[in-house]
Amino acid sequence: MLDMIIIGSGPAGLSAAVYAKRAGLDSLVIEKEYVSGGQVLLTYEVDNYLGLPGMNGFDLGTKFREHADGAGASFATDRVVSIEPCEDAEGKRFYRVKGAEGSHEARTIVAATGTVHRLLGVPGEDRFTGKGVSYCATCDGAFFKKKEVAVVGGGDVAVEDAIYLARLCSKVTLIHRRDRLRAAKSLQDRLFALENVEIVWNANVTEVQGDKKVENIIITSNSGASLAYPVDGLFIAVGITPVSECFRGLVEMDESGYIVAGEDCATSAPGVFVAGDLRTKKLRQIVTAVSDGAVAVSMAGNYLETL
Ligand code: NDP
């Protein structure tokens, strides 16, 4: 019987792993692949993590993992399928975490599976994924050197992607459904200063067309006019969706599937805590994920003392 199982190894899960070791808790991190760091690994440059301005996302994610390894954290690679609340002979609660590879038992759980990118949901998106449609500029941008690409979305990720791609591509067209970006002001200022970036406001990408690879996107303005726009690639950055399926039925979630918890990271199930982007919160950033990991372990430590 472990004290704690941490599910997920992004910044929240790895921070929890470091704090759990420091608290002397017998803990295990379950990650779905042997690649830690989460979404930060896909970020070209992280400019707002205190003390490390301009850090490459992959390097930062790798450092997080090295820190957890150095602290002595234990890792298992598995895909968690279900989490079952159970009681021992003394009536004390524990959780059985079942994965595709096996099961583990612990007194507390830290849910830190984060989020994945959202799909645009238009004809051609699925067919051309990997053939010109991408969800990761830093992973796939190099395939579009000196070519013309479009980015769809208006948040931090879309703007960061457009800035990154503008260094590689001859032209970047950012298409946004409103007349104002959601992204941080500092990112917007950098974007607006780039000469090879064009912004199409108040419009949506409604179809992706091509033969063997992307050739055109259909841009439909909010007034209803459509045009075929030739591009070599389309980068989709229209937000994120929580990875919370294995927690369904165990804890309270909001209508979008985020796990409901306040700043103490405590969920509706005793002994289950949620850290990072998966939690209902106002600001999803690396720094708030790392903070949650620490808080969740501290609260879990208090809970363990009550058992
Ligand atoms: P966001 O939810 O912030 O932005 C999504 C964007 O996509 C919005 O502009 C939205 O438009 C648009 N959008 C959503 N659905 C559609 C659709 N169907 N068609 C067209 N456009 C659509 O998501 P991000 O992925 O950019 O960021 C996720 C989180 O990660 C945010 O909290 C962000 O702050 C954080 N983040 C932090 C970073 C950092 O700390 N450095 C870096 C990157 C991300 P609209 O504006 O009209 O709603």
Image (spheres, rainbow, N blue to C red):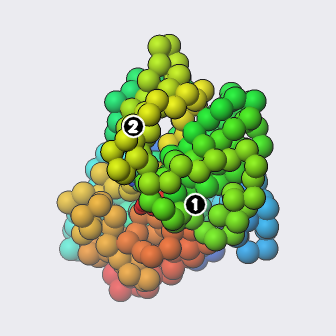
Q: Residues within 10 Å of mark 2 (few under 14, many from 20)?
A: some
Mark 2 residue type: Ser
Label 2: state its secondary structure. Answer: strand
Which residue is painted at 74% across and 35% down in the image? 170
User: Is 266 situated left or right of 136 in this image?
Assistant: left
Which residue is painted at 44% across and 54% down in the image? 202
Where's residue 289, x and y in %?
Answer: 54, 69
Q: Quadrant of the C terminus?
A: bottom left
Q: Nearer the viewer, residue 243 or 214?
A: 214
Which residue is painted at 29% across and 61% down in the image? 256
Ligand 1 under 8 Å from disc 1 Cβ: yes
**According to the image, label 2 marks what residue?**
226
Where's residue 106, x and y in %?
Answer: 38, 63
Residue 274: which quarter of the image? bottom left
Mark 1 residue type: Asp
User: Is 294 situated left or right of 302 in this image?
Assistant: right
State the CA–CA distance, disc 2 to disc 1. 26 Å
Residue 146: which quarter of the image? top right
Badge 2 or badge 1: first in the primary sequence: 1
Q: Residues within 10 Å of mark 1 (few under 14, many from 20)?
A: some
**According to the image, label 1 marks what residue?**
156
